[in-house]
Amino acid sequence: MTTHGPDPHERVQGHAYSARFHLLDRQVVAGDGTPICKVDDLELTGRDGRLYATAVLVGPAALAPRLRGRLGRLVAAAHRRLVVGGDGAPPRIPLERVRGIGAAVTVDARDLRVHALEDWCRDNVVGRLPGARHAAG
Amino acid sequence: MKRLLAVTLGILTAIGGFVDIGDLVASSLVGARYGFALVWMLLLGLVGICVYAEMAGRVAAVSGRPTFDLVRERLGPRVGLANLTASLLVTLLTLAAELAGVALAVELVSAVPYLLWVPAAGLLVWLVIWRVRFETMERIFGLLGLVLIVFIVAVWRLSPDWGDVLHQVTAPKVPADEPVPTYLYYAIALFSSAMTPYEVFFFSSGGIEERWKATDLATVRINAFIGFPLGGLLALAIMSAAALVLNPAGVSVDHLSQVVLPTSVALGKFGLGLALLGVFAATFGAALETALSSGYTVAQYFGWTWGKSAAPRRAARFHVVVLVALLAGTALILTGLDPVKVTEYSLIFAAVALPLTYLPILVVANDREYMGERANGRLANVMGTVYLVIVLLAAVAALPLMFATKAGQ
């Protein structure tokens, strides 16, 4: 639970969440407030003739189509060339993990791995520099 | 006591953020060329940054969201990315100019060419970011930057005819031999030096690094309403010193040595030494802020983990961006580009990028779902809207004026 902003549980009854306004492009944070990712896109699943948001999609593969036009194609192309293996589908965070929607979207981040680039930067660049394990504060 | 220490964030942002290479160059240049005829613009910019820094700080404290989070959220990914690209380019140019400022200050003391000091300055900035605590970093450079008060002493020692100065300030006239477009061009550069976007990026992100909560609003306001005007006072002193010494002598500012020249005329070697120390502290502090701001903006646009308070391993991409920004800034200055020109261009480009940064702040500061009771009051909205219009005008006029005046010639 973040300690910031209005309490998400206090949302007025019958006041619906708008996917575009409350979810898309919001910051996703872990329970302790650590930034995780953005809601780059939403996975929608059709059931009984209605669409339900079922997962938060993360990363350039999810963001590129939303950038539209030449820019979107450029990001998508750059991303494809950097990905090895897999089907190129963006990492997803199932909506069951979402704990609150407020100024940020709080998720249960245990064992969540959505960052290939973060892992690469940590293992190959930052982690190799002396003092990378110590917080400067 | 704790409150007193907290104010140092404001003082650092005031000294290293308000007075940075942009203010040093713009204030001094304008003072030397136009005397006191553009003081009004400095004051206009000063009020503007107070209004928006308070707003950005309040949003950060209440909702926990830094400025660039809001930019992407309210402008969408596409326009947000355009803003990111523009802001990042401007911040990089500014970072490069700050590094040159640090190196030039050392050159003026040591007589060793500044280009040799640039890599050392870049490395030192990185080491401070990597190892020094956020609060310690602020205090050291914030307090050291206060040495720039020497410019206020210098103005006082030059004992101008205050009545005459007041008249020049209140009834500004474009000098007879100066074209009006050039006057406006420098007016925009001066305005932009006060309202540089990286100041709100740093102010809001720094607040989150310091774990501001809604209960810290007093701190936010003390910082914005005392810290920034204090920085503005120093910029005003730098401009006045130039107006009193350089303007009558017909000296134009195209090197950092001319910025500090008035202190040596008024106070001799000792004054010059202090001024150089102040320039060093202010540019070094601002180099830290701009390098961190590069990381903040990119990380906040893409939603990455960011912050210099945690172990660097835990925010690897953020630290890679900071590192790359420092390398790029260092490399740019090592090409031998004129640091004063780099500063001028960074100010003009910043003017173009301003509206896309300030609009989302104003919108979110009014959103009760984020802000609850702490949403903007009427005064903040009136001031915010007025400044958004001014910022828009400056953004539209900046580039045409740059081309029309051949960048202020």
Image (spheres, rainbow, N blue to C red):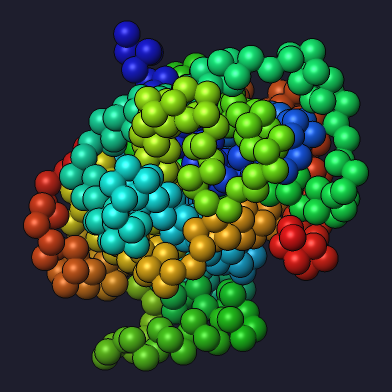
Q: Is residue A58 left or right of residue A70?
A: left
Position of residue B54 measured from the top left corner of the image (x, y, whole percent): 58, 29
Please name the residue shown 22% across and 73% down the image.
Answer: A120
Q: Quick one: B268 or B287, which is closer to the camera?
A: B268
Of all residues, the one furthest to the top in this rendering is B1
Q: Quick one: A124 or B11, which is closer to the camera?
A: B11
The C terminus of chain B - image quarter: bottom right
Residue B263 visible within the image? yes
Indicate the quadrant where residue B28 lies. Answer: top right
The answer to whether residue B372 is above or below residue B17 is above
Please name the residue shown 47% across and 55% down the image.
Answer: B97
Residue A92 visible within the image? no
Please name the residue shown 28% across and 61% down the image.
Answer: B116
Q: Is residue B179 left or right of residue B251?
A: right
Position of residue B166 measured from the top left corner of the image (x, y, whole percent): 79, 18
The answer to whether residue B240 is above or below residue B389 is above
Q: Quick one: B341 or A92, which is closer to the camera?
A: B341
Total labels: the figure holds 0
The N terminus of chain B - image quarter: top left
Position of residue A83 measured from the top left corner of the image (x, y, whole percent): 32, 86
Q: Is residue B169 left or right of residue A99?
A: right
Position of residue B135 measured from the top left corner of the image (x, y, whole percent): 29, 30
Please name the residue shown 52% across and 51% down the image.
Answer: B255
Indicate the quadrant where residue B370 lies. Answer: top right
The answer to whether residue B366 is above or below residue B400 is above
Q: Quick one: B28 or A96, which is closer to the camera?
A: B28
